[in-house]
Amino acid sequence: MARRRSHPAVRFLWIVAGLTVLVVIGAGLYRYFEKDLMRWVMVPSVEFREMPGGADYARAGMWIARPDLGDNPSLWTPRGFAATRTPRASVFFIHPTSFLESSAWNAPVDDEESQWRARLFVRSQASAFNSVGAVWAPKYRQATFGAFLTTEDNARRALDFAYRDVLAAYEAFLRQAPRDRPIILAAHSQGSLHLMRLLQERIKDGPEASRVVAAYLIGWPVSVSADLPALPLPACERPGQARCLVSWQSFSEPAEPSQVTDVYDASRGPGGVPRAGSAMLCTNPLTGARGGEAGADRNLGTLVPNEDMTEAEFRRGAVPARCDLRGFLLIGDNDALPDMGPYALPGNNYHVYDYALFWANVRADAERRLAAFERAQ
């Protein structure tokens, strides 16, 4: 008996159905193994080696942003805002990880792709402070993204190497910036890790410590019990408070922050104090107070990036925020948020957008804290 051939349209539907099943299975496997896959792709397989030569921050070319640079991304503002022409403070800003290669543990400062991303971060993050201060943002031989996905010694050495550049840049900043101005310290992600160490090891006993208005340790977990006691400034408890610390980590709901908590709970703070199970500092950027909840109507403006993140739409009242018990900043249901682009991390982690989500509120926050600092003087 001859075999009956199916109609072409029916065969096409079967092919589509089969591909759909494969995509669903693949997506499920990816979600199950995504952490392992990310480590396999992003963690360098080579041994750590120090890069030759030092970082000379007397050279203008070692800075992404500096007041005397003509092409300064920190001066960018969305429509309706402007950078001040009479800065009242000096802002030292440490950009987040922009080097994603697994070929080396640290980024060369002349790596074009990572420097392009770093400039975008300075543009969308450090620009929040340009209404009150002149921004100084150094290039540095940052640890690669994969260094945060492993506990091997190579990663520690890469981060130590990057910190030495940050420390050298900070010393140059103190020599070159006006010595009579207040200082605002700000960073994101890897930058905040280095800033926290800078506060602990250098600024705590430095003669300039009394000039620090506030420190913005955004996108990095700060343990209330293990880290805060070792820092020279307390947590910011209320809006308009000066000489204090601000920190948050943004997740949409349902949040799955195990990529953060797995590493955090296995780590120790200064003096070997365990962080396991401890609450993290959470400043609500919509209120400027520690903890609490605020609706989207309190959001003064979000930067919604375009596809290649070179432009941004400024949107008011788009994103709410509340601090949960562990210290994560929850920004509402994922489906109700503006489309921020493809760079949300696993677990609904909006880490990349920690500043952009609350850009105008960060700006207002810095203005209030500087005004309070000036009044106290």
Image (cartoon, rainbow, N blue to C red):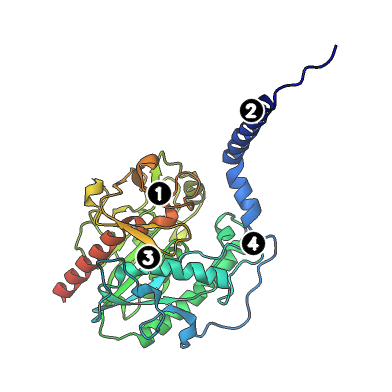
Q: Residues within 10 Å of mark 4 (few under 14, many from 20)?
A: some
Image location (x, y in percent) of residue 18: 66, 30
Which tag, 2 or 1, sits closer to the chain's start?
2
Residue 256 seen anywhere in this rendered image of the structure = yes
Q: CA distance from mark 4 to mark 1?
A: 29 Å
Checking the image for residue 13, the label placed there is 2
Which tag, 4 or 1, sits closer to the chain's start?
4
Label pair 4/1, CB-CB below 8 angstroms: no
Q: CA distance from mark 2 to mark 1?
A: 32 Å
Residue type indicated by callout 4: Ser
Residue type indicated by callout 2: Leu
Which tag, 3 or 4, sits closer to the chain's start?
4
- Residue drawn at 24 percent across, 63 percent down: 365
Residue designated by label 4: 102
Q: Is residue 280 left or right of residue 18?
A: left
- Residue drawn at 39 percent across, 54 percent down: 223
Checking the image for residue 339, the label placed there is 1
Instruction: Examine the rendered structure and indicate whether residue 262 appears above or below residue 28.
Output: below
